[in-house]
Image (spheres, grey):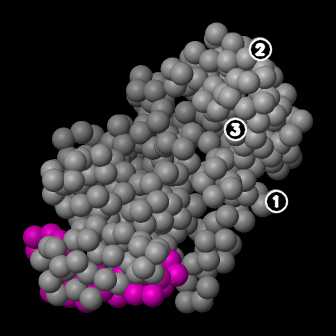
Amino acid sequence: MWSVRPVEQLSAAQARRLALGAQGFADPRPTGVPDRRALRRVIGRTGLFQIDSVNVLARAHYLPLFSRLGPYPVSLLDRAAYTAPRELFEYWGHEASLLPVTVQPLLRWRMAEADAISWGDMQQVFRERPQFVAEVLADVGRHGPVSAAEIEMQHGGRGRKAGPWWDWSHVKLALEYLFWAGQVTTSARRGFERLYDLPERVLPESVLTAPTPDRQEAHRRLLVLAARSFGVGTARDLRDYYRLPVADAKARLAELVDAGELWPVSVQGWRQPAYLHPDATIPRRVQARALVAPFDPLVWERERTERIFGFRYRVEIYVPAHKRVHGYYVLPFLLGDRLVGRVDLKADRQAGVLRVQSAHAEPGAPADTGPQLDAELESMAAWLGLSGVVVAGRGDLALTGT
C-alpha cells in the first residue's frame, strides 16, 4: 500500500486502485470459513449493505460479502443483523440498508424529519390520521415483533372491524412512517417480510443512550464515512452515499476541507473536483476476482462507475425484455483492477443450477477472463447450494464458458 500524502492530482489508475482498496477488493479473502471478524472488516470498508427485494440470484444484501470474502455462511450476516447482541440494523442509509448500529445516532436527524422528507404516501397517512399511526405504534408495543399483516388481523382483517383504515396497505404505510421516524425498527425477517418492534427491544443500550449529534455534525461524519468507503469521490459521489441534501453536503464538505478532515484533489479525466480521506491508501496492485452485484457500493452510482472503470453500466430489470442489451440481472465481473465482463445470472432453484443467461467480455479483456469467470461462477453456484452452472451461450464469453 502507498499512503496518500497531500497531492493535487491522482492518475486515473491511482483513483481506480484507491476506490477498489477502499471497498475491500485489495484485501485477501479468508483461507477458512469467514467469521464475524471477516464480516466486520467488510462492513468497515463498505459502511452498509443495500437491501433490495429482487431475488433472481440472491438478496442484494448478501452479495457484497460474497464478492469480497468468497463463499461464506449467510447465517453470519443474519446473526449480525437479527440476533443479539446486534452489530447491524436496518434503516435508510443509501436506500434501505443494513448499517452498523454505531451509525444510528448519525441518522437521527433523518428520523426527526420524517414528517417532511419521508415518501409522500407515508406523510399523508401521518398527517391525515395521526391517531391511526399512534394506534399502530401501540400495537407494535403490545405485540412486537409483528408484521403488517399480523397487525391488520388484530383488527379483523381488511376493514371488517375497525374501519377502512385498518387494511394492509394503510398499516404498512403507518409502519414505514414509524420506521422512517425511528419509532420502530426491524427485529427480524420472515423470509423477506419485515417484523417490527420497538428500538428499545432491539438495539443495544449503548446505542440508545449515545448522544445525538446536531444535524450539521451528523452530515460531516457521514461524509467522512462516505469518503473512507469510496476512497475518492466528487461532492455528488460522497453526498449520494448516505443520500444527504445537496446544499447541506456542499457546505459541510467545505468545512471538512478547512478542518483538514478531507483533502481536495483532481483526478485525471474527471471534470469535477474530488475529495479523499487523509488516511486513504493506494494499493500497489489489486488482484481481485469478483462478481459484483448491481446494488454493490462499488458500482451503484453509474456515472461514477463509468468515470472510474470506463464501464457503462445500466440495470435493465425494468427494461422490456426485447430491448435489453445485456440481460435482466447483470453483474460486472472484476478481474485485477478492471471490470472486464458482464454476466446475466439467474439462480434456478427448481432445477438446482446457476444459469448464465448471457456473458459478454469488455473490450481489452485479458485472455484468461473466461477461465477466471468460470471459476467464480462455480464458486457462486456452490455458495448458493446449486449443483452447477448452465451456460445459455449468448455473448462472446459464454461461447467459451463452463
Q: Secondary structure at mark 2?
A: helix
Mark 1 → mark 3, Cα distance in angstroms: 23 Å
110 lies left or right of 362:
right
Task: Single out the mark in the foreground, 2 or 3.
Answer: 3
Task: Single out the mark in the foreground, 1 or 3.
Answer: 3
- The verdict on residue 387 being magenta is yes
Task: Single out the mark in the foreground, 1 or 2.
Answer: 2
Amino acid found under the numbered disc labelled 2 = Gln
Q: Residue 117, image x and y in percent?
A: 54, 22
Tell me the number on the disc at residue 148: 3
Q: Residue at x 40, y 26 (%)?
A: 246
Q: Residue at x 40, y 87 (%)?
A: 388
| Of pointers 2 and 3, the one earlier in the residue sequence | 2
**Residue 34 or 271: which is nearer the viewer?**
34
256 lies left or right of 112:
left
Mark 1 → mark 2, Cα distance in angstroms: 32 Å
| Of pointers 1 and 2, the one earlier in the residue sequence | 1
| Up/down of 294 relative to 353, above or below | above
Mark 2 → mark 3, Cα distance in angstroms: 17 Å
Q: Residue 17, image x and y in percent?
A: 32, 66
- The verdict on residue 278 being magenta is no
Label 2 environment density (alpha carbons within 10 Å; few <14, some 14–19, many ≥20)? few
Label 3 environment density (alpha carbons within 10 Å; few <14, some 14–19, many ≥20)? many
- In the image, the segment drawn in magenta is 359-388
Q: Residue 94, image x and y in percent?
A: 49, 43
Q: Secondary structure at mark 3?
A: helix
Q: Residue at x 55, y 33 (%)?
A: 219
